[in-house]
Amino acid sequence: MVDPDSRRDYVGLFLNLAGERRTAFQSDCGEMFSRLLLADTVDTAVAALGRQKIDLMVVDLSGFEGPLELAAVGTLIRGRNGAPTLVLCPYVSSSWLPELMACGPLQYRITPVLAAETQQAVRQALAAPLDVVASAQQVLLDKEKELRDLLTIQRSLQRALGSVDEIGVMASQVCLALCSFPGVRHTALLHMKERGDLQLMAQESRNHLDIGRLMERRDRLLQSPLREIFPPLLAVATGEMVLLDAPEKAGDPELALSLHDRDVQMVLALPLRNEPGGPVLGAISFMFDRHLQFSREQFACFASLAQFVSFALGMSELKHQNDALAGKLTQMSTVDALTGAANRRKGEEILDGEIRRARRYGLSLAAISFDIDNFRSVNDLYGYPIGDQALRVVAGTVSARLRTSDTLARMRGEEFMIVATHTSAVDALKLAEKLRATIADTELPGCDTVTISLAVAQVAPEEGVSAVLERLDAALHRAKRSGRNCVELAMP
Protein backbone atom coordinates (compact mmCIF):
# COMPACT_ATOMS: atom_id res chain seq x y z
CA MET A 1 0.00 0.00 0.00
CA VAL A 2 1.04 3.58 -0.62
CA ASP A 3 1.43 5.95 2.30
CA PRO A 4 -1.73 8.17 2.15
CA ASP A 5 0.26 11.14 3.45
CA SER A 6 2.42 11.03 0.35
CA ARG A 7 -0.60 11.34 -1.97
CA ARG A 8 -1.26 14.73 -3.51
CA ASP A 9 -4.01 16.00 -5.76
CA TYR A 10 -2.70 14.32 -8.92
CA VAL A 11 -4.68 13.20 -11.95
CA GLY A 12 -3.21 10.27 -13.83
CA LEU A 13 -3.93 8.61 -17.17
CA PHE A 14 -2.99 4.99 -17.79
CA LEU A 15 -3.12 3.73 -21.39
CA ASN A 16 -2.89 0.02 -22.10
CA LEU A 17 -4.64 -2.35 -24.50
CA ALA A 18 -4.76 -5.27 -22.04
CA GLY A 19 -7.43 -5.10 -19.37
CA GLU A 20 -5.40 -7.17 -16.91
CA ARG A 21 -2.54 -4.68 -17.00
CA ARG A 22 -4.89 -1.71 -16.42
CA THR A 23 -6.38 -3.47 -13.43
CA ALA A 24 -2.94 -4.30 -12.03
CA PHE A 25 -1.74 -0.70 -12.41
CA GLN A 26 -4.88 0.62 -10.75
CA SER A 27 -4.31 -1.76 -7.84
CA ASP A 28 -0.59 -0.89 -7.50
CA CYS A 29 -0.66 2.87 -8.04
CA GLY A 30 -4.27 4.01 -7.87
CA GLU A 31 -3.89 5.47 -4.37
CA MET A 32 -1.09 7.76 -5.61
CA PHE A 33 -3.63 9.78 -7.62
CA SER A 34 -6.72 11.67 -6.56
CA ARG A 35 -8.12 10.49 -9.84
CA LEU A 36 -6.82 7.80 -12.22
CA LEU A 37 -8.25 7.56 -15.73
CA LEU A 38 -7.91 4.25 -17.57
CA ALA A 39 -7.77 4.10 -21.37
CA ASP A 40 -7.88 1.05 -23.61
CA THR A 41 -7.40 2.90 -26.92
CA VAL A 42 -5.36 5.86 -28.11
CA ASP A 43 -8.56 7.70 -29.03
CA THR A 44 -9.83 7.33 -25.46
CA ALA A 45 -6.53 8.73 -24.18
CA VAL A 46 -6.70 11.68 -26.60
CA ALA A 47 -10.21 12.47 -25.40
CA ALA A 48 -9.14 12.34 -21.74
CA LEU A 49 -6.16 14.64 -22.41
CA GLY A 50 -8.50 17.07 -24.13
CA ARG A 51 -10.97 17.22 -21.25
CA GLN A 52 -8.64 18.02 -18.36
CA LYS A 53 -5.08 18.49 -17.20
CA ILE A 54 -3.25 15.20 -16.71
CA ASP A 55 -0.34 15.34 -14.27
CA LEU A 56 1.17 12.04 -15.38
CA MET A 57 0.47 9.95 -18.46
CA VAL A 58 1.57 6.33 -18.20
CA VAL A 59 1.69 4.27 -21.39
CA ASP A 60 2.14 0.51 -21.16
CA LEU A 61 3.29 -0.70 -24.58
CA SER A 62 2.36 -4.31 -23.87
CA GLY A 63 -0.09 -5.34 -26.55
CA PHE A 64 0.85 -2.56 -28.98
CA GLU A 65 1.81 -3.71 -32.45
CA GLY A 66 3.02 -2.10 -35.63
CA PRO A 67 4.31 1.35 -36.62
CA LEU A 68 0.83 2.92 -36.81
CA GLU A 69 0.11 2.31 -33.11
CA LEU A 70 3.62 3.45 -32.21
CA ALA A 71 3.12 6.63 -34.22
CA ALA A 72 -0.13 7.27 -32.37
CA VAL A 73 1.66 6.96 -29.02
CA GLY A 74 4.32 9.36 -30.30
CA THR A 75 1.60 11.87 -31.11
CA LEU A 76 0.31 11.59 -27.55
CA ILE A 77 3.79 12.23 -26.13
CA ARG A 78 4.32 15.17 -28.47
CA GLY A 79 1.02 16.65 -27.34
CA ARG A 80 2.19 16.59 -23.71
CA ASN A 81 4.63 19.45 -24.44
CA GLY A 82 7.15 18.16 -21.90
CA ALA A 83 4.67 17.26 -19.14
CA PRO A 84 5.60 14.08 -17.22
CA THR A 85 5.22 10.87 -19.21
CA LEU A 86 6.18 7.36 -18.10
CA VAL A 87 6.49 4.55 -20.67
CA LEU A 88 6.42 0.90 -19.61
CA CYS A 89 8.03 -1.12 -22.39
CA PRO A 90 8.59 -4.90 -22.80
CA TYR A 91 12.29 -5.65 -23.31
CA VAL A 92 11.57 -7.34 -26.63
CA SER A 93 10.10 -4.01 -27.84
CA SER A 94 12.77 -1.74 -26.33
CA SER A 95 13.79 -0.51 -29.81
CA TRP A 96 10.64 1.67 -29.65
CA LEU A 97 12.06 3.81 -26.85
CA PRO A 98 14.47 5.95 -28.94
CA GLU A 99 11.69 6.61 -31.45
CA LEU A 100 9.31 7.75 -28.71
CA MET A 101 12.02 9.88 -27.09
CA ALA A 102 12.24 11.82 -30.34
CA CYS A 103 8.62 12.90 -29.73
CA GLY A 104 9.29 14.45 -26.33
CA PRO A 105 10.83 13.92 -22.89
CA LEU A 106 9.82 10.76 -21.05
CA GLN A 107 10.92 8.32 -18.41
CA TYR A 108 10.75 4.59 -19.04
CA ARG A 109 10.85 1.24 -17.31
CA ILE A 110 11.40 -2.14 -18.92
CA THR A 111 8.60 -4.59 -18.09
CA PRO A 112 7.76 -6.78 -16.36
CA VAL A 113 8.18 -4.63 -13.23
CA LEU A 114 7.23 -5.29 -9.64
CA ALA A 115 4.61 -3.13 -7.93
CA ALA A 116 7.27 -1.40 -5.80
CA GLU A 117 9.29 -0.52 -8.95
CA THR A 118 6.21 0.89 -10.65
CA GLN A 119 5.34 2.98 -7.61
CA GLN A 120 8.89 4.33 -7.40
CA ALA A 121 8.82 5.23 -11.10
CA VAL A 122 5.51 7.06 -10.67
CA ARG A 123 6.86 9.01 -7.65
CA GLN A 124 9.95 10.05 -9.59
CA ALA A 125 7.87 11.16 -12.56
CA LEU A 126 5.52 13.23 -10.36
CA ALA A 127 8.16 14.70 -8.07
CA ALA A 128 8.78 18.39 -8.63
CA PRO A 129 12.30 19.68 -7.86
CA LEU A 130 12.60 21.64 -4.60
CA ASP A 131 15.05 24.05 -6.20
CA VAL A 132 14.23 24.59 -9.86
CA VAL A 133 17.46 26.50 -10.59
CA ALA A 134 19.66 23.89 -8.86
CA SER A 135 17.79 21.14 -10.65
CA ALA A 136 18.38 22.79 -14.03
CA GLN A 137 22.08 23.23 -13.24
CA GLN A 138 22.35 19.58 -12.25
CA VAL A 139 20.71 18.57 -15.53
CA LEU A 140 23.33 20.60 -17.41
CA LEU A 141 26.16 19.01 -15.41
CA ASP A 142 24.76 15.55 -16.07
CA LYS A 143 24.49 16.30 -19.79
CA GLU A 144 28.07 17.61 -19.84
CA LYS A 145 29.37 14.44 -18.20
CA GLU A 146 27.25 12.34 -20.53
CA LEU A 147 28.73 14.15 -23.52
CA ARG A 148 32.29 13.60 -22.26
CA ASP A 149 31.61 9.88 -21.82
CA LEU A 150 30.14 9.61 -25.32
CA LEU A 151 33.05 11.48 -26.92
CA THR A 152 35.54 9.27 -25.09
CA ILE A 153 34.00 6.05 -26.34
CA GLN A 154 33.64 7.43 -29.88
CA ARG A 155 37.33 8.37 -30.00
CA SER A 156 38.32 4.95 -28.66
CA LEU A 157 36.18 3.24 -31.25
CA GLN A 158 37.54 5.34 -34.10
CA ARG A 159 41.09 4.30 -33.15
CA ALA A 160 40.01 0.65 -33.01
CA LEU A 161 38.45 0.79 -36.48
CA GLY A 162 41.81 1.46 -38.09
CA SER A 163 42.54 -2.29 -38.36
CA VAL A 164 40.10 -3.24 -41.12
CA ASP A 165 42.86 -5.27 -42.81
CA GLU A 166 42.48 -7.99 -40.18
CA ILE A 167 38.88 -8.46 -39.10
CA GLY A 168 39.75 -10.54 -36.02
CA VAL A 169 42.14 -7.90 -34.67
CA MET A 170 39.63 -5.15 -35.42
CA ALA A 171 36.84 -7.02 -33.60
CA SER A 172 39.01 -7.44 -30.50
CA GLN A 173 39.99 -3.77 -30.49
CA VAL A 174 36.35 -2.73 -30.94
CA CYS A 175 35.30 -4.75 -27.91
CA LEU A 176 38.16 -3.27 -25.89
CA ALA A 177 37.17 0.27 -26.90
CA LEU A 178 33.50 -0.24 -26.04
CA CYS A 179 34.46 -1.27 -22.50
CA SER A 180 35.47 2.33 -21.82
CA PHE A 181 31.81 3.34 -21.32
CA PRO A 182 30.95 3.80 -17.61
CA GLY A 183 29.53 0.67 -16.04
CA VAL A 184 30.35 -1.66 -18.94
CA ARG A 185 31.83 -4.94 -17.72
CA HIS A 186 31.61 -7.01 -20.89
CA THR A 187 31.36 -6.34 -24.62
CA ALA A 188 31.00 -8.75 -27.52
CA LEU A 189 30.93 -8.59 -31.30
CA LEU A 190 28.91 -11.19 -33.21
CA HIS A 191 29.34 -11.47 -36.98
CA MET A 192 27.07 -13.13 -39.52
CA LYS A 193 28.98 -15.35 -41.92
CA GLU A 194 27.69 -17.18 -44.98
CA ARG A 195 24.52 -19.29 -44.79
CA GLY A 196 23.31 -17.65 -41.60
CA ASP A 197 26.28 -18.77 -39.53
CA LEU A 198 26.42 -16.26 -36.66
CA GLN A 199 29.83 -16.36 -34.95
CA LEU A 200 31.31 -14.84 -31.81
CA MET A 201 34.12 -12.79 -33.33
CA ALA A 202 35.50 -11.24 -30.15
CA GLN A 203 34.67 -10.30 -26.57
CA GLU A 204 36.26 -8.20 -23.84
CA SER A 205 35.47 -9.23 -20.28
CA ARG A 206 36.09 -7.33 -17.06
CA ASN A 207 34.09 -9.86 -15.05
CA HIS A 208 35.46 -13.20 -16.32
CA LEU A 209 32.28 -13.87 -18.32
CA ASP A 210 32.62 -15.98 -21.46
CA ILE A 211 29.42 -15.76 -23.49
CA GLY A 212 30.67 -18.50 -25.80
CA ARG A 213 30.47 -20.83 -22.83
CA LEU A 214 27.18 -19.24 -21.78
CA MET A 215 25.65 -19.98 -25.19
CA GLU A 216 27.45 -23.35 -25.33
CA ARG A 217 28.91 -22.51 -28.76
CA ARG A 218 30.91 -19.88 -30.66
CA ASP A 219 29.52 -20.37 -34.13
CA ARG A 220 26.05 -21.08 -35.51
CA LEU A 221 24.81 -19.09 -32.53
CA LEU A 222 21.29 -18.78 -33.92
CA GLN A 223 20.92 -22.49 -33.18
CA SER A 224 21.49 -21.77 -29.49
CA PRO A 225 18.52 -22.45 -27.18
CA LEU A 226 18.95 -18.83 -25.98
CA ARG A 227 18.29 -17.33 -29.41
CA GLU A 228 14.82 -16.01 -28.48
CA ILE A 229 15.73 -14.46 -25.12
CA PHE A 230 19.44 -13.50 -25.01
CA PRO A 231 19.68 -9.84 -26.19
CA PRO A 232 22.63 -10.20 -28.66
CA LEU A 233 20.97 -13.16 -30.39
CA LEU A 234 17.55 -11.50 -30.26
CA ALA A 235 19.00 -8.33 -31.82
CA VAL A 236 20.29 -10.36 -34.77
CA ALA A 237 17.07 -12.35 -35.14
CA THR A 238 14.79 -9.29 -35.04
CA GLY A 239 17.12 -6.66 -36.46
CA GLU A 240 16.18 -4.34 -33.57
CA MET A 241 17.84 -2.91 -30.46
CA VAL A 242 17.20 -4.94 -27.29
CA LEU A 243 17.52 -3.56 -23.75
CA LEU A 244 17.23 -6.01 -20.86
CA ASP A 245 17.49 -4.07 -17.60
CA ALA A 246 17.35 -7.13 -15.33
CA PRO A 247 18.52 -10.63 -16.36
CA GLU A 248 15.53 -12.32 -14.72
CA LYS A 249 13.15 -10.50 -17.10
CA ALA A 250 14.32 -12.75 -19.93
CA GLY A 251 12.39 -15.58 -18.30
CA ASP A 252 15.28 -18.07 -18.11
CA PRO A 253 16.41 -18.72 -14.50
CA GLU A 254 19.73 -20.35 -15.54
CA LEU A 255 20.64 -17.41 -17.79
CA ALA A 256 19.68 -14.92 -15.08
CA LEU A 257 21.76 -16.77 -12.48
CA SER A 258 24.80 -16.95 -14.79
CA LEU A 259 24.64 -13.21 -15.48
CA HIS A 260 24.05 -12.24 -11.85
CA ASP A 261 27.03 -14.40 -10.83
CA ARG A 262 29.19 -12.14 -13.04
CA ASP A 263 27.59 -8.97 -11.63
CA VAL A 264 25.64 -8.25 -14.83
CA GLN A 265 22.64 -6.05 -14.05
CA MET A 266 21.73 -4.89 -17.55
CA VAL A 267 22.35 -5.93 -21.18
CA LEU A 268 22.08 -3.73 -24.28
CA ALA A 269 22.43 -5.25 -27.76
CA LEU A 270 22.28 -3.52 -31.14
CA PRO A 271 22.11 -5.10 -34.60
CA LEU A 272 24.77 -4.27 -37.17
CA ARG A 273 23.73 -3.31 -40.69
CA ASN A 274 25.30 -1.11 -43.36
CA GLU A 275 22.06 0.74 -44.13
CA PRO A 276 18.55 1.01 -42.66
CA GLY A 277 16.55 -2.01 -43.68
CA GLY A 278 19.65 -3.76 -45.02
CA PRO A 279 20.74 -7.28 -44.07
CA VAL A 280 21.89 -7.79 -40.48
CA LEU A 281 25.66 -8.28 -40.32
CA GLY A 282 25.75 -9.24 -36.65
CA ALA A 283 25.41 -7.47 -33.30
CA ILE A 284 27.34 -5.71 -30.57
CA SER A 285 26.41 -6.14 -26.93
CA PHE A 286 27.15 -4.24 -23.73
CA MET A 287 26.76 -5.74 -20.26
CA PHE A 288 26.56 -3.30 -17.35
CA ASP A 289 27.20 -3.75 -13.64
CA ARG A 290 24.51 -1.19 -12.77
CA HIS A 291 21.04 -0.03 -13.83
CA LEU A 292 21.11 3.04 -16.07
CA GLN A 293 18.37 5.20 -17.52
CA PHE A 294 19.56 6.09 -21.01
CA SER A 295 18.79 9.45 -22.53
CA ARG A 296 17.83 10.03 -26.13
CA GLU A 297 21.40 11.20 -26.82
CA GLN A 298 22.87 8.02 -25.35
CA PHE A 299 20.59 5.82 -27.41
CA ALA A 300 21.61 7.83 -30.48
CA CYS A 301 25.29 7.42 -29.57
CA PHE A 302 24.95 3.65 -29.24
CA ALA A 303 23.19 3.55 -32.62
CA SER A 304 26.06 5.57 -34.14
CA LEU A 305 28.63 3.22 -32.61
CA ALA A 306 26.79 0.27 -34.14
CA GLN A 307 26.79 2.06 -37.50
CA PHE A 308 30.55 2.70 -37.28
CA VAL A 309 31.20 -0.96 -36.52
CA SER A 310 28.88 -2.01 -39.37
CA PHE A 311 30.79 0.16 -41.85
CA ALA A 312 34.10 -1.24 -40.61
CA LEU A 313 32.85 -4.82 -41.01
CA GLY A 314 31.60 -4.00 -44.48
CA MET A 315 34.91 -2.39 -45.43
CA SER A 316 36.85 -5.35 -44.05
CA GLU A 317 34.72 -7.84 -45.96
CA LEU A 318 35.00 -5.73 -49.12
CA LYS A 319 38.78 -5.60 -48.76
CA HIS A 320 38.98 -9.37 -48.34
CA GLN A 321 36.76 -9.84 -51.38
CA ASN A 322 38.93 -7.44 -53.40
CA ASP A 323 42.07 -9.25 -52.25
CA ALA A 324 40.56 -12.60 -53.25
CA LEU A 325 39.50 -11.16 -56.61
CA ALA A 326 42.94 -9.67 -57.15
CA GLY A 327 44.45 -13.06 -56.37
CA LYS A 328 42.18 -14.72 -58.90
CA LEU A 329 43.02 -12.10 -61.52
CA THR A 330 46.72 -12.54 -60.83
CA GLN A 331 46.37 -16.29 -61.16
CA MET A 332 44.40 -15.89 -64.38
CA SER A 333 47.14 -13.64 -65.79
CA THR A 334 50.01 -15.94 -64.79
CA VAL A 335 48.60 -19.50 -64.89
CA ASP A 336 47.65 -21.58 -67.91
CA ALA A 337 43.99 -22.44 -67.40
CA LEU A 338 44.16 -25.85 -69.13
CA THR A 339 47.21 -27.41 -67.47
CA GLY A 340 47.71 -25.37 -64.29
CA ALA A 341 51.31 -24.62 -65.29
CA ALA A 342 52.64 -21.07 -65.44
CA ASN A 343 51.88 -19.33 -68.74
CA ARG A 344 54.58 -18.17 -71.18
CA ARG A 345 54.82 -14.64 -69.78
CA LYS A 346 55.18 -15.91 -66.21
CA GLY A 347 57.64 -18.59 -67.29
CA GLU A 348 59.91 -16.07 -69.01
CA GLU A 349 59.62 -13.74 -66.00
CA ILE A 350 60.67 -16.54 -63.61
CA LEU A 351 63.54 -17.57 -65.89
CA ASP A 352 64.78 -13.98 -66.04
CA GLY A 353 64.64 -13.67 -62.24
CA GLU A 354 66.48 -16.95 -61.70
CA ILE A 355 69.15 -15.96 -64.23
CA ARG A 356 69.79 -12.72 -62.33
CA ARG A 357 69.91 -14.57 -59.00
CA ALA A 358 72.26 -17.27 -60.36
CA ARG A 359 74.54 -14.59 -61.79
CA ARG A 360 74.58 -12.60 -58.52
CA TYR A 361 75.39 -15.58 -56.26
CA GLY A 362 77.33 -17.77 -58.69
CA LEU A 363 74.69 -20.55 -58.71
CA SER A 364 74.11 -23.18 -61.35
CA LEU A 365 70.86 -22.96 -63.34
CA ALA A 366 69.38 -25.17 -66.03
CA ALA A 367 66.35 -24.94 -68.32
CA ILE A 368 64.58 -27.86 -69.98
CA SER A 369 62.24 -27.55 -72.95
CA PHE A 370 59.95 -30.35 -74.15
CA ASP A 371 56.93 -30.91 -76.34
CA ILE A 372 54.60 -33.81 -77.06
CA ASP A 373 55.56 -35.81 -80.13
CA ASN A 374 53.03 -35.91 -82.99
CA PHE A 375 50.49 -34.01 -80.94
CA ARG A 376 48.55 -32.94 -84.02
CA SER A 377 47.95 -36.59 -84.81
CA VAL A 378 46.47 -37.10 -81.34
CA ASN A 379 44.01 -34.26 -81.96
CA ASP A 380 43.18 -35.53 -85.45
CA LEU A 381 42.65 -39.15 -84.38
CA TYR A 382 40.92 -38.71 -81.02
CA GLY A 383 39.60 -35.16 -81.05
CA TYR A 384 40.48 -32.01 -79.14
CA PRO A 385 38.93 -33.07 -75.80
CA ILE A 386 41.28 -36.10 -75.71
CA GLY A 387 44.16 -33.85 -76.78
CA ASP A 388 43.41 -31.45 -73.94
CA GLN A 389 43.29 -34.37 -71.52
CA ALA A 390 46.69 -35.55 -72.80
CA LEU A 391 48.15 -32.07 -72.14
CA ARG A 392 46.77 -32.06 -68.60
CA VAL A 393 48.11 -35.56 -67.84
CA VAL A 394 51.59 -34.79 -69.22
CA ALA A 395 51.78 -31.48 -67.31
CA GLY A 396 50.55 -33.10 -64.11
CA THR A 397 52.95 -36.02 -64.40
CA VAL A 398 55.94 -33.72 -64.97
CA SER A 399 54.93 -31.34 -62.15
CA ALA A 400 54.70 -34.24 -59.70
CA ARG A 401 58.36 -35.08 -60.32
CA LEU A 402 59.76 -31.58 -59.95
CA ARG A 403 61.04 -29.92 -56.79
CA THR A 404 59.10 -27.09 -55.19
CA SER A 405 61.84 -24.70 -56.30
CA ASP A 406 61.40 -25.70 -59.97
CA THR A 407 58.83 -24.12 -62.30
CA LEU A 408 56.84 -25.67 -65.14
CA ALA A 409 55.52 -23.25 -67.79
CA ARG A 410 53.43 -23.86 -70.90
CA MET A 411 55.13 -21.87 -73.63
CA ARG A 412 52.85 -22.59 -76.59
CA GLY A 413 50.53 -25.36 -77.76
CA GLU A 414 52.11 -28.63 -76.67
CA GLU A 415 55.51 -27.08 -75.78
CA PHE A 416 56.61 -26.61 -72.13
CA MET A 417 59.65 -25.29 -70.28
CA ILE A 418 61.14 -26.23 -66.90
CA VAL A 419 63.27 -23.78 -64.90
CA ALA A 420 65.47 -25.96 -62.67
CA THR A 421 67.28 -23.96 -59.98
CA HIS A 422 70.64 -25.03 -58.50
CA THR A 423 70.96 -27.58 -61.31
CA SER A 424 73.94 -28.36 -63.54
CA ALA A 425 73.74 -29.67 -67.10
CA VAL A 426 74.55 -33.22 -65.92
CA ASP A 427 71.74 -33.23 -63.35
CA ALA A 428 69.35 -31.62 -65.82
CA LEU A 429 70.09 -34.37 -68.35
CA LYS A 430 69.32 -37.01 -65.72
CA LEU A 431 66.04 -35.28 -64.86
CA ALA A 432 65.10 -34.98 -68.53
CA GLU A 433 65.74 -38.68 -69.12
CA LYS A 434 63.58 -39.63 -66.12
CA LEU A 435 60.76 -37.44 -67.40
CA ARG A 436 61.04 -38.91 -70.90
CA ALA A 437 60.84 -42.48 -69.58
CA THR A 438 57.98 -41.67 -67.21
CA ILE A 439 55.82 -40.10 -69.92
CA ALA A 440 56.54 -43.00 -72.29
CA ASP A 441 55.23 -45.41 -69.63
CA THR A 442 52.17 -43.33 -68.76
CA GLU A 443 48.81 -44.51 -70.07
CA LEU A 444 46.56 -41.73 -71.29
CA PRO A 445 42.76 -42.13 -71.09
CA GLY A 446 41.14 -42.40 -74.51
CA CYS A 447 44.27 -42.61 -76.65
CA ASP A 448 47.57 -44.40 -77.16
CA THR A 449 50.62 -43.61 -75.04
CA VAL A 450 52.42 -40.43 -76.11
CA THR A 451 56.08 -39.54 -75.93
CA ILE A 452 57.97 -36.28 -75.47
CA SER A 453 61.17 -34.85 -76.90
CA LEU A 454 63.37 -32.77 -74.61
CA ALA A 455 66.17 -30.19 -74.80
CA VAL A 456 68.47 -29.31 -71.91
CA ALA A 457 70.51 -26.10 -71.50
CA GLN A 458 72.74 -24.94 -68.68
CA VAL A 459 72.50 -21.16 -68.45
CA ALA A 460 75.80 -19.36 -69.06
CA PRO A 461 76.82 -16.55 -66.63
CA GLU A 462 76.16 -13.67 -69.05
CA GLU A 463 73.30 -15.24 -70.99
CA GLY A 464 69.82 -13.70 -71.19
CA VAL A 465 66.35 -15.20 -71.55
CA SER A 466 66.19 -14.85 -75.34
CA ALA A 467 69.53 -16.60 -75.86
CA VAL A 468 68.55 -19.50 -73.59
CA LEU A 469 65.22 -19.99 -75.36
CA GLU A 470 66.90 -19.90 -78.78
CA ARG A 471 69.36 -22.61 -77.72
CA LEU A 472 66.58 -24.75 -76.32
CA ASP A 473 64.51 -24.33 -79.48
CA ALA A 474 67.41 -25.41 -81.71
CA ALA A 475 68.17 -28.46 -79.51
CA LEU A 476 64.48 -29.44 -79.45
CA HIS A 477 64.41 -29.43 -83.25
CA ARG A 478 67.47 -31.70 -83.27
CA ALA A 479 65.72 -34.10 -80.89
CA LYS A 480 62.75 -34.33 -83.23
CA ARG A 481 64.97 -34.88 -86.27
CA SER A 482 66.73 -37.64 -84.33
CA GLY A 483 63.54 -39.66 -84.14
CA ARG A 484 61.69 -38.04 -81.20
CA ASN A 485 61.32 -39.50 -77.69
CA CYS A 486 64.88 -38.49 -76.85
CA VAL A 487 66.94 -35.81 -75.04
CA GLU A 488 69.32 -33.31 -76.66
CA LEU A 489 71.82 -31.06 -74.89
CA ALA A 490 71.77 -27.43 -76.07
CA MET A 491 75.44 -26.52 -76.43
CA PRO A 492 76.59 -22.93 -75.70
Image (cartoon, rainbow, N blue to C red):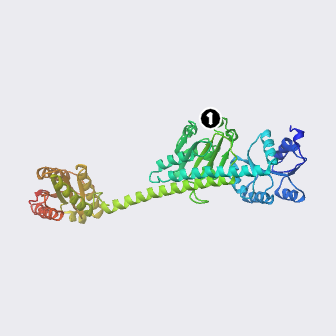
Q: Left or right? Give the position of 391 relative to 242.
A: left
In-front residue for pair 441/338? 338
Quadrant where the C terminus is found in the figure: bottom left
Left or right: residue 225 versus residue 380 is right
Q: Quadrant of residue 467?
A: bottom left
Q: Nearer the viewer, residue 365 or 10?
A: 10
Q: Name the residue located 70 percent from the left edge and 47 percent from the top edge.
A: 293
Relative to 145, 47 lies left or right: right
**For the residue marked with disc 1, what is the amino acid?**
Ser
Image coordinates of residue 2 in percent, x first then y, are 86, 39
In the image, is 427 to the left or to the right of 205? Answer: left
Q: Give the quarter of the image for residue 462.
A: bottom left
- Residue 449: x and y in percent read 21, 55
The residue carrying pointer 1 sits among few (fewer than 14), some (14 to 19) or many (20 or more) residues within 10 Å by Cα, namely: some
What residue is at 62 percent from the left and 54 percent from the top? 301
**Count of residue discs:** 1
Image coordinates of residue 54 in percent, x first then y, are 86, 54
Q: Nearer the viewer, residue 291 or 334?
A: 291
Q: Secondary structure at mark 1?
A: helix
Q: Is residue 475 visible?
A: yes
Q: Nearer the viewer, residue 263 or 443?
A: 263
Q: Quadrant of the N terminus?
A: top right
Q: Is residue 61 visible?
A: no
Residue 248 drawn at (x, y percent): 69, 38
Look at mark 1 in the image and give the residue it sits on.
258
